[in-house]
């Protein structure tokens, strides 16, 4: 009797999650696959897939910019996360609050705020023009917006917290006794970091890479606002075909491109999970 009650409780607990997954994950994915392999009339076709080859340069550009943004986030995030993990509890709490505070604001507001900083009459160019005027020179300002550099900057700014927090969490979970043992065995600070701290923080690094790379490759708002629409990313193309911003609505082509993006994300997630499992099973390096 108790066994049947336990099984019933488990089913009742899993049912809401399973329903959510079916309605909001499996059904939309099935619809994307259906539209990707059908025409507007509903007949089967492979013609939609040719657009994947047509827009291959856009896909490669999306991958490249997402990769660059992810690498920059990792380079910036690790020292910040490491410094936070070594600080006092009060500083850790305050630093975590400061990092999370921008995430409480709307994504569009955060992105639009960079326009007032980077545009030709924005904060940076206004300051530089004032300095140039005081020195008697003429300065027209730098082109800081409507380019790929601005797109990467927007990605880094918006997604950097998603890199810092997982790494910080991994670093705070490291047992201090391991560090003390490494020092007792004659390791200096560099070797302690190389052979103990860094290997044990790899799961956080992998989680951060996944959480930054996936939204970076699929973004479309950042490229439109800070890139000026000059460079279309795959997210822009998908939005364009579904909403008809260019005057053409084609769910089938949009679904085909979405399917490719979905496959790329699944591949990236698979590799990240694979490396994460290897890092957890191998543990820290030899001291």
Image (spheres, helix red, strand yellow):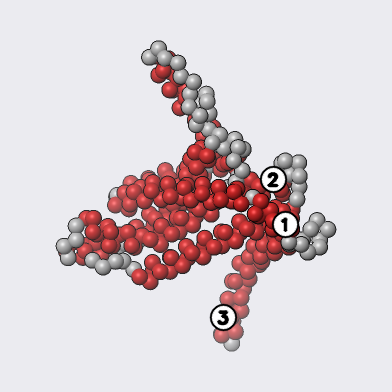
- Give the residue at mark 1: 48
Q: Is residue 14 visible?
A: yes
**In the rendering, at what x and y percent does residue 213 appear?**
50, 53
**Residue at (61% x, 67% y) in the render:** 17
Q: Position of residue 267 (x, y in %)?
A: 54, 63
Q: Residues under labels 2 and 1: Cα distance?
A: 15 Å
Image disc number at residue 240: 2
The residue positioned 17% from the left and 65% from the top of the image is 185
Spatial separation of the CA atoms under disc 3 and disc 2: 50 Å
Dividing the picture into quarters, in which one does residue 25 lie?
bottom right
Determine which residue is flagged by label 3.
6
* Residue 71 x/y as whole percent: 43, 50
Left or right of residue 232, residue 280 in this image? left
Front position among marks 3 and 2: 2
- In the picture shown, does residue 286 fall above or below 74? below
Is residue 207 or residue 226 the one in the foreground?
Answer: 226
For the residues bearing labels 1 and 3, Cβ distance under 8 angstroms? no
């Amino acid at each position: 009797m108790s066994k049947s009650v336990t099984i019933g409780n488990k089913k009742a607990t899993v049912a809401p999650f399973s329903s959510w997954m079916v309605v909001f994950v499996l059904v939309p994915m099935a619809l994307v696959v259906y539209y990707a392999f059908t025409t507007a009339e509903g007949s089967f076709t492979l013609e939609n897939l040719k657009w994947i080859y047509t827009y291959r340069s856009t896909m490669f550009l999306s991958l490249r910019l997402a990769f660059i943004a992810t690498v920059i986030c990792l380079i910036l995030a690790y020292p910040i996360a490491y410094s936070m993990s070594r600080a006092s509890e009060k500083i850790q709490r305050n630093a975590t609050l400061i990092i999370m505070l921008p995430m409480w604001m709307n994504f569009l507001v955060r992105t639009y705020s960079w326009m007032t900083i980077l545009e030709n009459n924005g904060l940076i160019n206004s300051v530089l023009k004032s300095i140039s005027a005081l020195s008697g020179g003429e300065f027209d300002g730098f082109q800081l917006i409507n380019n790929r550099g601005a797109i990467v900057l927007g990605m880094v700014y918006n997604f950097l917290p998603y890199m810092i927090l997982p790494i910080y969490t991994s670093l705070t979970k490291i047992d201090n006794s391991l560090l003390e043992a490494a020092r007792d065995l004659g390791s200096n600070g560099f070797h302690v970091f190389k052979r103990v701290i860094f290997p044990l923080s790899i799961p956080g690094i992998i989680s951060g890479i996944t959480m930054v790379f996936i939204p970076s490759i699929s973004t479309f708002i950042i490229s439109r606002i800070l890139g000026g629409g000059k460079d279309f990313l795959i997210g822009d193309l998908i939005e364009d075909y579904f909403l008809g911003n260019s005057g053409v609505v084609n769910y089938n082509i949009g679904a085909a491109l979405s399917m490719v993006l979905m496959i790329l994300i699944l591949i990236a997630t698979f590799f990240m999970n694979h490396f994460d499992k290897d890092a957890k099973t191998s543990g820290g390096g030899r001291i």
